[in-house]
Amino acid sequence: MEIFRAPIGTHDVLPPDSAWWERALGAFAQLARRAGFGLLLSPLFEDVAVFDRGIGATSDVATKEMYVFEDRGGRRLALRPEGTASVVRAFVQHRPVVPWKVWYATPAFRYERPQAGRYRQHHQVGVEAIGSPDPALDVEVIALAARFYEALGLRRVRLLINSMGHPECRAAYVGVLGAYLGEHAAELCEEHRTRFAESPLRVLDCKRPACVAVTERGPQLPDHLCAACREHFAAVRSGLDSIGIGWSLAPRLVRGFDYYTRTTFEFVSEALAAAQNAVGGGGRYDGLAEQLGGPASAGVGFGSGLERLRLAWEAEGHHGEADRVDVFVVDTTGGSHATVLADQLRREGLVVERAFDQRSMKAQMRLADRSGAAVAVLVGPAEAAQGSVTIRDLRGAAEGAQVTVPASELVATVRERATER
RNA sequence: GUGGGCGUAGCUCAGUUGGCUAGAGCGCCAGGUUGUGGUCCUGGAGGUCGCGGGUUCGACCCCCGUCGCUCACCCCA
């Protein structure tokens, strides 16, 4: 019999590692709600065109990394490769009151060769705010991301920001950049030497030393913005300053999706190797809703990869903690008392574990110890006969001490002893 | 899609120039006399040596293929 494995590039997250995921998702949900973002649930797959038109039919993600399939009705669908396009599609479909602020947590799929920090299915949390060009919204979105990383305990995450302008001023810049690259074509890397004209902006993103040397001396995006875009960008930066969020200007930061306008940003972890150091990113996409058939609507958002965040978190020296157990019920009379006692204690809000399969007392005590429980509640023939329970401290100063009390005093006694640590 | 490294118990790995019923540590299970965990001691379960083919008297060890894992490039979270 063949043993099945998770498909290539995918992975299971099991306890105790999954405890970190619970904390991360919980922290994100709380921050998003505090900032007025509501949860959006949307389908994992969409008409391929949503992504083609959304993230740009020429981007790598759309051309060679999408999980495209046909359903039984002949519809061409794709598993979502990122979060934003689906949200904007939902916006266009439902036309909610603006600004529409939503958060999401979702898997994302990209058909590419897996490596460290890169998977075929990864998971993102993010927010989108659609319907307003106000730079205060850019600030709110970026701040949410920054506070999220802080909440996770990440200290070595840096914010890089840039502005790509609106379509007109960007087009003007692309013209200037293209001309400049043409003059220095011979100095570019092998790939871009002949291909720079197809997409001059992509050259800015090239990490090869040759291209970096040329582009860092060339015309810079922020210097070619129109007055309105310049003003918007300045407002975003001063907004970040006003709440103490540090940033670095990254004039050559051009993100992989075609929909970005004006503000673009990326959070990178200094604890991770440069190849996969981006833990989150986003920006404005003021033309995207229109692209998907909706009204002209500004929008801004970000997404963050949970696997990357976990890697960064570990690289910063954090380590996982097991799920906490408050009480372990040991029952040597067959297990029926444990059923009743565990239920009673759980209804009191305590985290309660117990043994199964009628194991020996020694085995149950060993499990109790390994569970990390503060106290064990023991029921044997003697307790069962007299309607009492024995409560034993498993850790702390009183470790090893135990008392036998009437069953009616179970909750009070456990509370008193379990909360000491 | 291209290239490098690796594939032996649940996990981390040993396994001598191919040759006795394939090992260790950890983990797991059970004991160490009277109902009580952590340390210690003893014992036990658990492996088609990724899979298929080839060379050989004989292969975990050599050759070929294949699948998988991993790292890198591209790009991204």
Image (tube, helix red, strand yellow):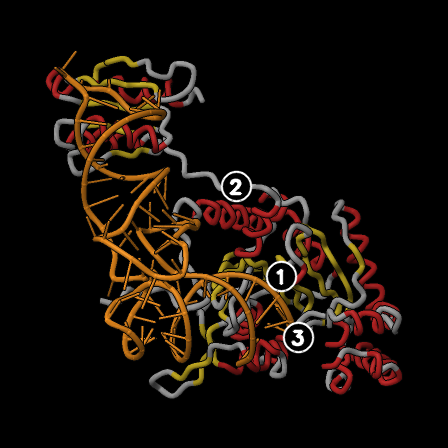
Mark 1 lies on a secondary structure that is helix
Circle nearer the N terminus (3, 1): 3
Residue A225 visible in rendering: no
Judged by depth in the image, the label closer to the viewer, 3 or 1, is: 1
Q: CA distance from mark 2 to mark 3?
A: 37 Å
Q: Residue sitting at 80 percent across and 73 percent down? A: A210
Q: Residue sitting at 15 percent across and 34 percent down? A: A358
Residue A239, percent from left and from top: 77, 52
Left or right: A285 in relation to A249:
left
Circle nearer the N terminus (2, 3): 3
Mark 2 lies on a secondary structure that is loop
Residue A250, percent from left and from top: 79, 62
Left or right: A210 in relation to A316:
right
Q: Chain of mark 1?
A: A
Q: Amino acid at mark 2?
A: His
Label 1 Cα neighbours within 10 Å, binned few <14 / some 14-19 / many ≥20: some
Q: Which residue is mark 3?
A: A259
Circle nearer the N terminus (2, 1): 1
Please say if A14 is above or below B29: below
Residue A3, percent from left and from top: 28, 64
Residue at mark 2 shares a chain with residue at mark 3: yes
Q: Amino acid at mark 1?
A: Gln
Q: Relative to the observer, which residue lies in front, A361 or A200?
A: A361
Q: Which residue is mark 2?
A: A319
Q: Which residue is mark 1?
A: A276
Q: CA distance from mark 2 to mark 1?
A: 20 Å
Q: Chain of mark 2?
A: A
Q: Relative to the observer, which residue lies in front, A181 or A33?
A: A181
